[in-house]
Image: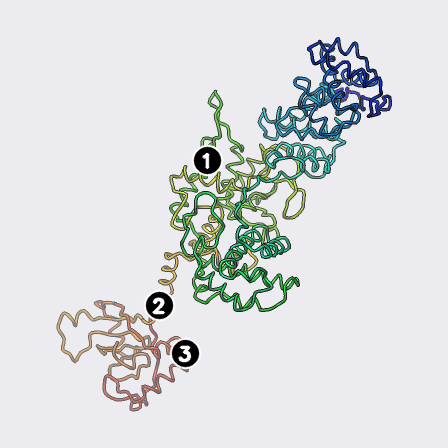
């Protein structure tokens, strides 16, 4: 039998029905209190005063509480004296004290604060201990006193073992998270974990005075979700942003209301809605400066829309912005980029179109043609992917394949042991997925356990990676290098068993692959944690000519390299590999490199297409002997015969030989003697072709007949025209490729 099962079932220790809970004091009780107060004020020991005053109706419940919380008897008089003093001052028994009065009594309790809190909690249903602030230890002390030290320590031991297995540090699992658990148990008024509910955790979460104090409470909810007590853990509140106090200064109130209404009801992501909202406030400040009488969207017309369009076109960074808090950005005062202008055009167009569609404002003008971007701005918008240079990427690959704990050390203990926030196996897996898989940062964080599948006969080279639902499509499977699968399998072997968490995109309860301490991989880990350390290890700057190296630039780099490989992937294959819905999206990532373009241009043979190589035979014996000009020494191989005309490349009939006197058929005796010579020098001569001659070679009979008809009256090198030589059939030569 375990220690936990040996504990008796817990019941409420105080029977409130046994007491007289009348908040009004009786006459004799009031007289006794008035006579006892001077003694307490003059320093008379509390034990003597309490012994004289009696007051059994008030003392008996306090004594029962002291007995239950196992308070030593020498401290009983001090507690009773504190309670009597406050009862006398307020003129009511503690049964009628408000939450605020109990808080005041607890604050004045000194060393007796936990005991006073126990009296308030057990006797009067006090439930405002959180009002004392985040950094108080009364929840822990109250839980020990009310629920029993043995029971709480047994629960803490089980909790600590589970948290350490998940990867939490010993101090966090032993001290901080148990304190949050005590707050939850005290709020639920029961030490049984099975009695806790999701609604209770939400109540504790919402009454936290600071959003940053929800870390350990979130860990408590993960424990409960792992034990199937609640359906899902509560979400940790994000760290609050400090808004610019001058954000709404100078903006018409009605314009602000319209902008907030759009932000709360638009059908876009939170990031897009927030960015659009900030720009709408900028437009509001422009209205206040240039058109102070225009305060609402319904007052806009086409003329004002065109003027606003011009304002955006000429806008510079910092124009009509709220007062800056802190240092101004580096691009302050510079013109907006074309992409930035396009976003602003779209923001206004969507804002007015939605308000008109919802019936908030009358349709006084059409937003789409009114806020159409100028053609000059649209022409500047490029879809050039921010590809990382090959040499920099090669160094990052080397750094990722050789990651060590020293590269991600968060601290060292006195013995010299290196500690990392995430296990090194998890860091290696994340690194290789980023370097080789070519998926988005959100998809990396949401990978599931078992996402790698191996082929039976191909384990060392390529494996399949199951990518979860993304922003443009459903889940899909893609092949990746085997090193990715090996790193993921190595992490899965040491990954502690943890509870399923809710995937915010799909609403499913899933086992996230990169889960540590029951927390998914941080949203900023790739850009702020992983990539800077890889750049430092590789010895490359984190910024290049195209900007900062971010997680998404790896996707463009890998896609471009696959598209420009020696045996490249086609556009549609790359579309499937990247998980895009449209080929146009893939074109934004895959860029043809100048080297690849040069090779393709050379292979296309643009210049060589207009040249043909003709086999030329040179009779070396005649050249050495210096034969006369009347004898032929150079022979152009036409396939069906030889042409002995020295300036064959200038002959207009070269592609449609007229068989003049320079022509030597291959079946003749002279041709046989020529082919039998051993001293022939074989050469190839490139002949530039006209468009008509090129068509005669490429297109066939119709182009040849057209060429023949144009050359019918053109004299041959021998003198006669083809019409005069028509008794001899015309033939087409065959050019050697």
Q: Please say which color scheme the image uses.
A: rainbow
- Count neighbours of disc 1 (C-alpha within 10 A) and say few if under 14, some if 14 to 19, many if 20 or more: some
Residue 700 — which label? Answer: 3
Which of the image's four quarters has the N terminus?
Answer: top right
Q: In 3D space, how far apart are the residues under numbered discs 3 and 1 (Cα atoms)? A: 64 Å
Q: Nearer the viewer, residue 387 or 14?
A: 14
In the rendered structure, are the residues bearing label 1 and label 2 in contact, judged by CB atoms less than 8 Å apart? Answer: no
Residue 403 — which label? Answer: 1
Nearer mark to the viewer, of 3 and 2? 2
Q: Element type at marker 1? A: loop
Q: Position of residue 492 (x, y in %)?
A: 58, 36
Residue at (28% x, 87% y) in the render: 714
Q: Element type at marker 2? A: loop
Q: Element type at marker 3? A: loop
Q: Position of residue 266 (x, y in %)?
A: 62, 56
Task: Report the residue marked by disc 2.
Answer: 606
Image quarter for residue 639?
A: bottom left
In the rendered structure, are the residues bearing label 3 and label 2 in contact, judged by CB atoms less than 8 Å apart? Answer: no
């Amino acid at each position: 039998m375990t220690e936990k099962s040996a504990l008796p079932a817990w019941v409420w220790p105080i029977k409130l029905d046994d007491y007289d809970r009348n908040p009004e004091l009786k006459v004799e009780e009031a007289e006794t209190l008035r006579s006892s107060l001077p003694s307490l004020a003059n320093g008379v020991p509390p034990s003597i005063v309490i012994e004289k005053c009696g007051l059994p109706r008030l003392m008996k419940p306090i004594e029962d509480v002291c007995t239950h919380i196992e308070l030593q008897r020498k401290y009983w008089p001090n507690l009773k004296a504190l309670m009597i003093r406050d009862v006398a001052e307020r003129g009511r028994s503690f049964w009628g004290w408000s939450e605020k009065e109990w808080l005041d009594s607890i604050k004045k309790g000194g060393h007796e604060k936990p005991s006073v809190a126990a009296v308030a909690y057990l006797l009067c249903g006090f439930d405002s201990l959180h009002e004392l602030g985040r950094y108080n230890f009364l929840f822990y002390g109250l839980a020990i006193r009310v629920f029993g030290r043995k029971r709480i320590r047994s629960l803490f031991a089980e909790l600590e073992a589970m948290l350490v297995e998940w990867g939490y540090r010993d101090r966090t699992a032993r001290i901080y998270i148990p304190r949050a658990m005590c707050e939850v148990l005290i709020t639920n008024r029961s030490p049984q974990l099975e009695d806790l509910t999701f609604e209770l955790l939400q109540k504790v979460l919402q009454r936290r005075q600071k959003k940053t104090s929800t870390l350990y409470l979130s860990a408590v909810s993960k424990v409960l979700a792992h034990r199937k007590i609640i359906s899902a853990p509560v979400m940790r509140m994000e760290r609050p942003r400090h808004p610019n106090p001058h954000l709404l200064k100078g903006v018409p109130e009605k314009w602000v209301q319209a902008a907030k209404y759009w932000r709360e009801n638009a059908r876009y992501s939170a990031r897009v809605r927030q960015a659009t909202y900030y720009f709408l406030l900028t437009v509001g400040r422009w209205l206040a400066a240039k058109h102070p009488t225009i305060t609402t969207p319904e007052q806009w017309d086409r003329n004002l829309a065109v003027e606003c369009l011009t304002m955006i076109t000429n806008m510079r960074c910092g124009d009509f912005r709220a007062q800056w808090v802190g240092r101004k950005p580096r691009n302050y005062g510079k013109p907006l980029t074309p992409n930035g202008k396009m976003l602003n055009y779209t923001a206004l167009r969507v804002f007015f179109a939605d308000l008109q569609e919802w019936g908030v404002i009358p349709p006084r003008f059409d937003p789409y043609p009114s806020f159409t971007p100028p053609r000059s701005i649209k022409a500047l918008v490029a879809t050039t992917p921010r590809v990382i240079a090959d040499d920099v990427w090669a160094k990052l690959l080397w750094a990722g394949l050789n990651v060590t704990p020293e590269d991600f050390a968060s601290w060292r203990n006195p013995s010299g042991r290196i500690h990392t926030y995430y296990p090194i196996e998890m860091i290696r897996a994340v690194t290789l997925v980023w370097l080789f898989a070519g998926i988005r940062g959100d998809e990396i964080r949401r990978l599931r356990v078992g996402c790698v599948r191996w082929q039976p006969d191909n384990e060392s080279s390529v494996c399949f990676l199951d990518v979860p639902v993304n922003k443009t499509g459903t889940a899909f499977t893609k092949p990746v290098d085997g090193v990715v699968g090996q790193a993921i399998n190595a992490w899965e072997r040491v990954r502690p068993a943890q509870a399923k968490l809710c995937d915010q995109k799909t609403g499913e309860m899933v086992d996230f692959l990169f889960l540590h301490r029951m927390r998914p991989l941080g949203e900023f880990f790739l850009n702020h944690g992983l990539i800077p350390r890889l750049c430092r290890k590789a010895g490359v700057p984190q910024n290049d000519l195209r900007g900062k190296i971010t997680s998404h630039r790896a996707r463009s780099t890998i896609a471009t390299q696959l598209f420009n490989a020696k045996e490249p992937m086609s556009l549609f294959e790359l579309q499937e590999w990247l998980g895009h819905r449209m080929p146009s999206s893939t074109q934004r990532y895959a860029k043809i490199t100048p080297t690849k373009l040069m090779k393709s241009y050379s292979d296309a043979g643009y210049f060589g297409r207009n040249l043909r190589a003709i086999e030329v035979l040179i009779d070396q014996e005649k050249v050495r002997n210096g034969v006369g000009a009347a004898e032929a020494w150079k022979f152009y191989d036409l396939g069906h015969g030889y042409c002995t005309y020295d300036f064959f490349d200038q002959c207009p009939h070269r592609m449609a030989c007229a068989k003049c006197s320079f022509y030597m058929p291959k079946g003749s005796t002279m041709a046989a003697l020529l082919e039998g010579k051993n001293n022939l020098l074989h050469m190839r001569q490139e002949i530039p072709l006209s468009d008509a001659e090129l068509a005669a070679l490429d297109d066939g009979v119709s182009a040849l007949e057209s060429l023949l008809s144009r050359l019918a009256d053109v004299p041959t090198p021998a003198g006669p025209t083809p019409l005069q030589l028509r008794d001899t059939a015309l033939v087409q030569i065959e050019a050697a490729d």
